[in-house]
Amino acid sequence: MTHQSARWTEPRGENFLPFTRHRETLLSLADISLARNGHSVLDHVSFDLGRGETLGLVGESGAGKSTIALVAMGLLRPPAVTLDGRMQFAEHEDLLAEPEAEWATLRGRRIAMIFQDPASALNPCFTVGRQLEAPLRRLLGFDRVAARRRSIELLESAGLNDAEARLAAFPHELSGGMQQRVMIAIALACNPELLLADEPTSALDVTIQAQIMQLILEQVRARNASCIFVLHDLALASQVCDRIVVLYAGQMVEAGPTESVLRRSLHPYTNALKSCVIELDTEALTPPEGGLPALGAMPPGCRFAPRCSRATAQCTSQTPPLRSLEGREIACWHPG
Amino acid sequence: MAVRDLSLPDRDALRLPRLLADQLRSRPFFVIAAMVSLTFLFAAVFAPWVAPYAPDFQDSNALMAPPSAAHWCGTDSFGQDLLSRVIYGTRYVFLIGFSSVAIGAVGGLAIGLAAGLTRGAVEWGLMRFVDAILALPSLIMAIAFISILGPGVDKVIYAVGFAMIGPFARTVRADVLQVRAQAFVEAAGLMGVDRLRIIWRHILPNVIFPLAVQATIRIAEAILVSSALSFLGLGVVPPAPDWGLMISEGRAFISIVPWISGVPGAALALLLIALSIVGDGVREQFDPKMRTNR
Amino acid sequence: MTETAPIFRLLDVEKVYQIDRGGWSRLRRNPPRRLAALDGIRLMVRAGDSIALVGESGSGKSTLLRVLLGLTETSDGRALYRGDDIAVLTDEKRRSFQRDVAMIYQDARASLNPRLKALDLIGEPIRQHALCPEPELRDRVAALLARVGMPADTADRYPGQLSGGQVRRVAIARALASEPKVIVADEAVSGLDVSTQAQLLNLLRGLQHEMGLTLLFITHDLAVASYLCRRIAVMYLGRIVETGPTKEVLRHPLHPYTRALLTASPRFFEPIAETLPGEIPSPIDLPPGCRFAGRCRRQIDRSRTVASTSRRSPRRAPVAKSLASTR
């Protein structure tokens, strides 16, 4: 596709794009493996993301969710880590092999990121306006007046009232929710095709969380952009994601449409995660014992086997391959 | 549930040669600087065995002799071997450096703790005292002291040590304020742990470590100030082989025989640079704020 | 009805911070601004009770907790522990208070001295209250560690060597060390993985049942509140707006704020709820009337001016809302 024009596409409000089953693939990760200091952090992670699709990466902390987002953003690259596999993004066939200069043309402009903690992602020394206008002027070549006008539009569409006054505010003068709205406005400033949201609401109150999630979805859909959410809350993931990838200790264990993965989970780990989710009417929680294996001490075979109730000798000796089953991909010897 | 060991390196990494090789690869400057500092320290401890001559031996055949096989670094205007004097001078350097920093650190710890733990008049008084010390540069302060106490190695130590109390007290107080605001201090109070015990077990250990790091950095400063005092003729009394004194003695001949000042000057510069790098390295190692991977 | 004696009683507790505007304002003698962190809090905690305090950040939950622990003095009203004012306990009563009331901090790692081993951390309250002779300390700590599901060799580790979930367990073990009767926990399970959170919730629930602990639990998660606590108090801007049995309040919330909190928490496969507009306002110089009025969908002129006070709904404890019954 041609390069996105700098022109502002009005959000289409409630008229979301209809859900289409066959979408053009925007991002495709194939066999991504990443190791840091000789320890495997990601192991053969592969998934596709269609244009206009939202995908959720879920799992416990240490599963490699955020690492995937950083790889897709081009922020984790050799020589800091060893990285194998292929990443295809739009017309770029093998982005991981391309030089930093190529990444620089994509980052911020076509791939943008929202971080977990807006307070530390925003620079405390500069006003909101300056941080918002910077990408517009640098990446899209807006002049000062246009950048300012566009900034106001962006802040308004991010749900900040009194946008003009907010431009002169410093980040610490805003609440956490408002800071995250500013972050979203900055991330969407260049109409990116891919938005990466790393736990965008875990630092916020539930009421604000609902607002922010709604905002991200609206904005992403209005632009027909794709979005990868890194989430630890399965219930929230079920609300916002078209598809879900469940990760455990750097490996994909189950991936597919949210409905099938979360309603009829086949992998014991997905089931275990579901059993940890606490709801108002929860009478008893049955979480799996223990925690993730240490980075240097991955068990042989299925990495979840030591915590799995269904584990057999096969599980502790052979690594289960990722295979298709009932409309999803799953890596388990004993699914069901 | 297995307890994961998140921070301790495995035992192999603790073996000395491997540790040294690792360190040399990751921080070459630190290792070189540490070796230079240790060489000076070695020279100071074993001066009588290392130095080719006695520090006050005067070779009347070689006055102001240039470096030669007999006198590696040349001789001064009295025919004294410069290398030997520099080596013996290292003793004064370290004696003054360590002792005055010790005085400064202990004094600073006492005042800083007291100021950090109290409120009101006591804190106000102590901090104004510290401000008074800080108002004068340490060299000026030390000069004032020497002029009251008179010259001598011990007096230099007192003077430089006293001047150091100010900065140490400041950092200790800041650390105390930071530590006492932490949840674990409040938690100890809630459990009914009494005040002295909280100070001893919870506040002091968390203040001592940054203080020790601070001390290693300040040694270089103490040495510099003491050398400056000697250079001005206010510190160590001749004919003691003090570096500052030696630089001062060679000053008159600097254009014709530059080595008389040059050799102790170079030694001083080398040691100060090495100590500063070591100090920074130690801080990187122990200051949690500068550590990147926990 | 036989009721056990209350452990904690808060009688119209108020906490107002005066904010000095400084500079020119002081010269012009403007009155300092008032930040009402707590406003007319009435709460009773009986032995064996479990109460959840919920609300957004900035609602005054933590200030209330600090008042209960005697860390913050009240501006008005009284906070009583077994009938005595917490601020002025006698030495003897203070000692028993320190032993009987244990706190679990939100940031467990910060609440543990990083330079002490788990043995000394957990051993500290034991030594302080001389609960066992020194030689038996290690066994006692090992028993406490086992109680929270940690192996005995944890005793020789520093907090820096433990993961987030493990540090919380050590913090819980320390809270149990003085054999307390009341546990006060501030967001003790937030910011953790769902699996770790579930493990800790089960641990706390087990402890509460087996040891008959009284539990005061601050949380922002209604589901956590309903899992652990029999009673709930919903706070908004320094006031308790609704309180009662947890199941009852969550099943039939009367206050629109409680209802908003309920709908905001994510539920499987339901679309994101119609959200509560705006954010919690600054507690400085609050306008008169109901504090929730600015965000309330049902507010009419009446609630703007009539300061709502808690009143009892026929079925249960106070609902602070002038329109509560007209839902």
Image (cartoon, rainbow, N blue to C red):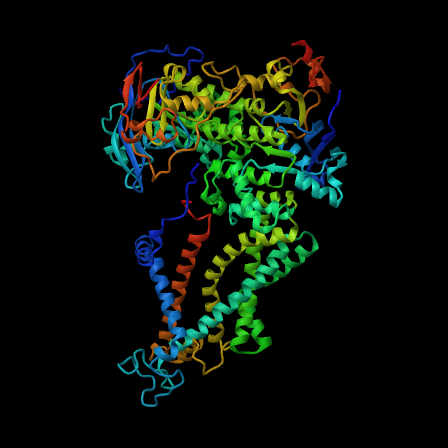
Picture quarter containing residue A5?
Answer: top left
Judge by depth and name the residue closer to the eye, A13 or C99. Answer: C99
| Residue A215 appears anywhere in the view | no
> Total of numbered circles in the picture?
0
Picture quarter containing residue C295?
Answer: top right
Q: Is residue A322 left or right of residue A282?
A: left
Q: Residue sitting at 55 percent across and 59 percent down?
A: B168
Which quadrant is home to the C terminus of chain C? top right
| Residue C235 appears anywhere in the view | yes
Whole-percent x, y for residue C183 in the image: 62, 34
Q: Is residue C10 above or below residue B76?
A: above
Whole-percent x, y for residue C42 in the image: 72, 26
Judge by depth and name the residue closer to the eye, C307 or A36. Answer: A36
Q: Is residue A124 above or below residue B161?
A: above
Q: Is residue A51 above or below residue B292?
A: above
Q: Residue furthest bottom?
A: B60
Q: Is residue C24 above or below residue C260?
A: below
Q: Is residue C291 left or right of residue B235?
A: right
Whole-percent x, y for residue A30 in the image: 26, 26
Q: Is residue A240 left or right of residue C132?
A: left
Q: Residue sitting at 36 percent across and 79 percent down?
A: B49
Which quadrant is home to the N terminus of chain C? top right
Q: Is residue C78 left or right of residue C223?
A: right
Whole-percent x, y for residue B88 in the image: 40, 77
Picture quarter containing residue A245?
Answer: top left
